[in-house]
Amino acid sequence: MDQAKGNGQAQRRVTPFILSRPHLSVQSQGVRDTLDDPHEAARRLREGTVPAVVGALPFDTANPSALTVPVDLYRQRRVWQGYPKPSPIPACTVSDSLPSPARHVEAVETALKRLRAPDDPLTKVVLARSLLVRAEAPILPTMLVQRLVSDDAGNNGFCVDLSPAGADYRGRTLVGSSPEVLVRRSGRHVTCFPLAGTAKRESSVDQDAAVAARLALSVKDLAEHAIVVEGLKSSLGELCDELDVPEAPSLVQTPALWHLGTPISGTLRDERTSALDLALAIHPTAAVCGSPRAEAAKAIAQIEGDRGFYAGAIGWCDGNGDGEWMVAIRCGEIAADGLSVRVYAGGGIVAQSDPLAELAETSAKFATMLTALGAVEQPVPRTG
């Protein structure tokens, strides 16, 4: 078990940082310092003045981040084991949708007008919506992440205190089970695993196999995925040598969904470039933003407003520069009182998209969080 040791300064009681992955689990304890500027955090890591950084980057990195310098950082080469006697999740109910399903369909239709216009540079934009889930008693973030980890075939799960981002986030926690690796660094070895192109799984084995086969051949989903891969090749090409990018994506399964995924790897050109530096260089990818990035981000801000930490990144980086950052999807933000959770889901819109299919995709993606919470979304309308 590796540790980044602290100096025994006073610690405040906060939700620990937890990241469970199939190959590694990471958990922090205590707080040496907090930072809301990720570039300052990256500089301190390079200078060796902090032993490690954990936390979350927002979707728009011009906004405050939620980063912590922990007293202790524990890493184990196995999935997170959780707590021996987890508390039950209180009864939960979906109470609101923002925007409404009908408004989300309208937003997709608005985006499609731009995407299909011959003189518009926008080729993809990711649009999201959220559900407010209310609980009968406070939800403990650590118990929710334990449920998510146990529900996920890859034992993926994360829990991040958002308080370092400032007063608006004091006491709030981001919890989720992301299947998507933004970037991982081990020595000079760099890997990414973008996911783009999605289909809902079926309970019947034969029907599920048919869904996967259709996704693998879907012109719309392959086009959406190619935009993401090309964007990462461009961003990583400036920082890495010897990029290895498969010619075609592979099928990736989660309990609720099929995805198209492409494992990308490379060799870091400058060993001083940390995992946090890499995350800042490539985030947000076209998988959660769109392309061109600046045009897509502007469209998202106009349509959705501030996303906060949804579709941001969560992860860690140690003093050697090694670390891993996940895309903050399949997640929800727990309120400071624990009595509500805002859960999020989005989808990539390209010229071939169908508005009602995009709405259905967001409903399918809500399943990860809603299943863990024991809540159900009301059926969404199938007509505009």
Image (tube, helix red, strand yellow):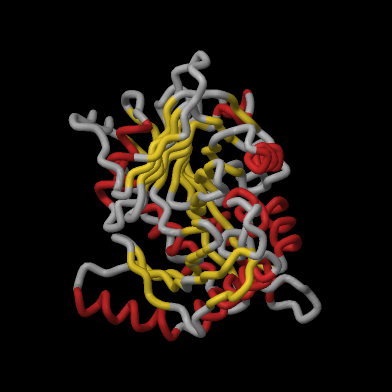
Q: Residue reaching furthest top?
A: 10
Residue sitting at x 19%, y 32%: 84
Front-most of residues 241 and 145: 241
State which quarter of the image contains the N terminus. top left
Q: Where is residue 259 in the image (x, y as percent from the top left)?
A: 41, 69
Front-most of residues 228 and 26: 26
Q: Residue reaching furthest right?
A: 119
Residue sitting at x 51%, y 20%: 7
Query: Going by the image, does 348 lie left or right of 261?
Result: right
Residue 355 falls in image quadrant: bottom right
Residue sitting at x 30%, y 52%: 155
Front-most of residues 65 and 87: 65
* Residue 124 in view, yes or no: no
Residue 374 falls in image quadrant: top left
Q: Where is residue 356 in the image (x, y as percent from the top left)?
A: 49, 67
Residue sitting at x 50%, y 45%: 315
Q: Position of residue 246 (x, y in %)?
A: 49, 81
* Residue 151 in view, yes or no: yes
Query: Going by the image, does 130 lie left or right of 137?
Result: right
Residue 33 falls in image quadrant: top right
Q: Position of residue 116 (x, y in %)?
A: 69, 78
64 vs 380: above or below: above
335 vs 145: above or below: above
Tag count:
0
